[in-house]
Structures are given as structure tokens and as C-alpha cells.
Amino acid sequence: MKNNKLREFVLSNTLLQRTWVHQRARKLAKTHPEGLAPPMPMRVIVEPTNACNLSCAYCGNSEMVRPKTNMDLGMYETLLDQMVELGIPRLTLHTIGEPTLHPNIVEMLQMAADRERCVTMSTNGSLLNEKTARGIVKARPDVINFSIDGADQETIDLTRGGLNFEHFLENLRTMRRIRDDEGVMTDSPWGRVRLPTLTITCVLTPHFTREVERKFFETFGPLVDDFLFHWPNSHGDYIPGTPLHKPGILPGKWREALFRQVREPCHYPWDALFLLASGNMSVCRFDFDGRVQVGRFPESSLLELWNSESMRSLRRAHMSFDYKGWEQCRDCTATFYENRHEHMVTSRKLMRRNGIEPARTAWLASDPRKKIPSRAK
């Protein structure tokens, strides 16, 4: 009992949790310099396009220099077939850019659903309309996530440049109505439900005040099934010096120096591959210019890329905290300030104090095959 309480205390304190994970990684690295990699990735994150129609204050997309392009459907189909062959269960359609800018995004969702992959798409919601929303629902994805950081135009103007809040809200309402009326019924941990599960992710900037927080839950609580909140970071050093990090007692520079000493290995090299629209394979969701590349697809297969020397080198860099050859990872504050555990702790805290009980705990899944509804035939 005492050990459980101690563990809970350590995990609830960001600095203690970082120190604990950091020391565990150093200990493991002595016997396993590359960590313990599974035989294949648990998921593949796909970039339908790297184009975006918004300009968010905490996002490095506006600093990206690589050309805007859309993913070729032939390459995407090859990816899906390899995922089926290898038994990789999860697919996410979103990295850099807004997925609904791809002219065939509904078809891409349908292709993945037809192969019984657990499919998530994240969108800024600005381009949805009745036709597109209905097409998405009929394509049978498991989760559609909406990204929004406020509940009024004033807050949105400070964080998510170019978004009309009332238009976003109407689009979300349209998606919810169509989902409730026409979404496929399936058994789930939450009973018989309609797909897709609708979620919201929110970046917690200083503009997300207590008043904005209350309005946020009042507005979106009736419209979505779950929430995920997280703090911003430097996006792989694309937005260095941003004043958007989680506030703390220590001054920013002191705090960053402290957290740098107890950073943890990024989890992506042991979890996922990121297929960019061009065919370059990355290992980072903040890789705006494809700097964290491990090869090209389909010239190399998923399994070859997962076990490549480039991937092994990246794992060694993160286990040793020596980023020679991977300097783009060195100053990324994502491994200083945030991780999945902190996202969960923060999300639970905000929902609890606003009286929100998620209808479907979609974001708390450790195993998507247990938490995400099985697909109805």
C-alpha cells in the first residue's frame, strides 16, 4: 500500500517522474544500448499532406521550407498492405499539415478501415462541411480528433491564426449530428456506440485561463466523447524561446537547464514510424523538414526501416542522451516537459475539476484493441 502511494506521488510530480524515468533509461542502456525495441512498430503515422491553412502560434509549420505535397495513393496502399502483413494495428492520418486538404482524404480513411486498421484522424476542423463530414463518418474511422485551444474568437486569434471559431463550432456540431444519426454501430468497452469516437485535443498556452477553461468545457463537453490536454514545446527547435511552456516556480532558463539534465528518451523510436507525404520516413511528429529521416518508403519496407542502422543509431542516441548525428533531437523540449503520462495526469485534473466524465476514455488507452471499439462488419 505504501509502495503504491509512493509510486503515485512520484508519477504525479513532473520533476520526480522525469528523474525516475531518466535513471531507469541510464540503467537499461548499460545492458541494452538501443533499449528494448519491439519487433515492429505499434503504429504508423501518415502525413496526407504537409500543407496547412492555419498559422498557430506554437507550431513550426510556418517555418517549414520543404515543398508542399500530397501523398500518392499508390504509396499509401502499399503501406496499408504491409501493415496488414506485419500485423501493425494502428494508423493515424496526421503529422504536419491539415489532412482534409488532401483531395482524397475520405478515400484514405476508407482504405484503412477496409483493412481493419484502428484509424485515427486529427483535424483543425476548419474545412469540414456536410458532405465531407458525412463522407468521413461513412468511411468508418475509429477516432476523429479536433484540435482547438479556446472557446471564443478572441482566444483563438491569439493561438490559432486564421480559424473562424463559429465556423469551427458549426462544423463540429455537424460532425456530431451525422455521427449520432448515421455512424456505424459497434460493441465497445462503453456499450453499443456509433463510430467514430469524437475527441478534442487542446494545447495549454497562457491564454487558456480559468475562465477560458470553464467556457471550453461548457461549449465542447456536450459535443465530444473525450479530451486530451498538453503543454506546448519547441517543436524540435522550430520555435525556440517560445514563452508557452508550462509555468513553474523556477525562471524559464533555470528550469530548462534542470529538466535537460533529467530528460527522458523520446518514445517514438520504439513506438512508431512517420511516413511523410514525399515518401521519406521520419521518426518525429515535429519533423517539419524531414530532418529525422531513417530512409525512404516503399524503396525500403516498413520492417527494413524499423530495423535499419539509422533507426538503431537514433535509439542509441536517445538511450545515451548523446545526440551526435541527431542534433535536431538535442534541443527539442518535448522530452523535457511533456510525455504521455503527463498528458493523462493533466487531462484528468482539468476534466475532474470541471465535472467532466468522458463518455469514452479514448485517450487513456494503453492497448487500442481493448479501448477502441472493434469494427462492425
Image: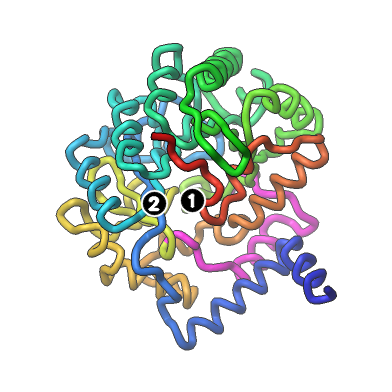
Q: Looking at the picture, which amino acid does disc 1 mark?
A: Arg
**Which numbered dot is residue 369?**
1
- Using the numbered discs, state the Cα–Cα distance from disc 1 to disc 2 in whole angstroms: 8 Å
Q: Residue at x 71, y 52 (%)?
A: 345
- Of helix, strand and loop, which mostly describes the magenta segment? loop
Q: Residue at x 27, y 45 (%)?
A: 80
Snapshot quadrant of residue 217: top right
Of 102 and 253, nearer the camera is: 102
Q: Is residue 294 above or below residue 39?
A: above
Q: Quick one: which residue is furthest to the bottom in this view?
A: 31
* Residue at x-position 75% and y-position 62%: 13
Marks 1 and 2 in Cβ contact (< 8 Å): yes
Looking at the picture, tell me which residue is in the foreground, 229 or 370: 370
Q: Is residue 258 left or right of residue 314?
A: right
- Residue type for callout 2: Pro
Quadrant of the image containing the N terminus? bottom right
**Residue assigned mark 2:** 89
